[in-house]
Amino acid sequence: DAKTTQPPSMDCAEGRAANLPCNHSTISGNEYVYWYRQIHSQGPQYIIHGLKNNETNEMASLIITEDRKSSTLILPHATLRDTAVYYCIVRVWDNAGNMLTFGGGTRLMVKP
Amino acid sequence: DTGVSQDPRHKITKRGQNVTFRCDPISEHNRLYWYRQTLGQGPEFLTYFQNEAQLEKSRLLSDRFSAERPKGSFSTLEIQRTEQGDSAMYLCASSPDSHLIGNIQYFGAGTRLSVL
């Protein structure tokens, strides 16, 4: 699986958009970008995934650059409950059931 | 609540004791994973089951660790002769066996182990 690079921490004002970047310059053509987050004392929670098109769901939007070497997770209106560690993971979409490889993630602090 | 249950939530034990954790996955999920997470780090993969078959094990899973999923439903993770270095959060995740889903994993809240 491709290696990802994320800033270790970010701050965001409550109600503003949180934009979390991820670099994955060695991504392969068959690898997807997944985002999970982990709120303190809880297990990781799936947020969104994508291949090359931008994706949106009820939690967030995922913007993937045209060359697929980087992506941005957008929380449109961050709340205090969005304070968490956000993990960007790149892996093959397959049926093999392999593990997720977590890096250090970005610690997002949403401030009032 | 993701539907993945882990028990107990917290376990304090003395070095050298054996401990066992239980994970109940989402009922229709064939795949079950165990991860370990130490303070300030992301989760690290330990092992994976497809139904009752243990298909993959990490090098982190020393011979003091054993995992089972006897009927393809719940799973147990046992640590024998615990060491202080085993102190961590042990996370369980499950996912459906569906190519359409792309191995999205749903995690439990974890069991926090403290070895004194």
Image (cartoon, coloured by chain):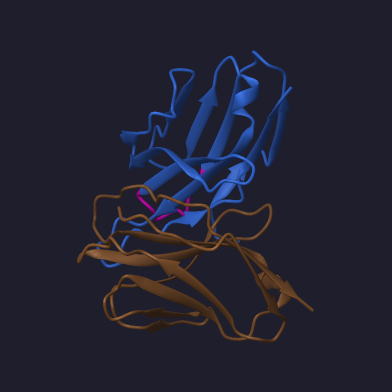
Chain colours: A brown, B blue
Percent position of residue B13, x then y? 71, 23
Q: Residue at x 62, y 19 (%)?
A: B83
Q: Is residue B29 magenta?
A: yes
Q: Residue at x 64, y 63 (%)?
A: A84
Percent position of residue B70, x then y? 40, 32
Question: Where, quadrant-wise, is the C terminus of chain A in this rendering?
Answer: bottom right
**Which quarter of the figure has residue A44?**
bottom right
Q: Residue at x 41, y 49 (%)?
A: A101
- For residue B15, side relative to residue A65 (left or right): right
Percent position of residue B111, x then y? 63, 40
Percent position of residue B29, x then y? 39, 53
- For residue B72, side relative to residue B40 (left or right): left
Closest to the observer: A37 or B22? A37
Q: Magenta segment range?
A: B24-30
Closest to the observer: B7 or A39? A39
The kind of secondary structure the magenta stretch mainly shows is loop
Closest to the observer: B24 or A16? A16
- Position of A58 relative to B113 (above/below): below
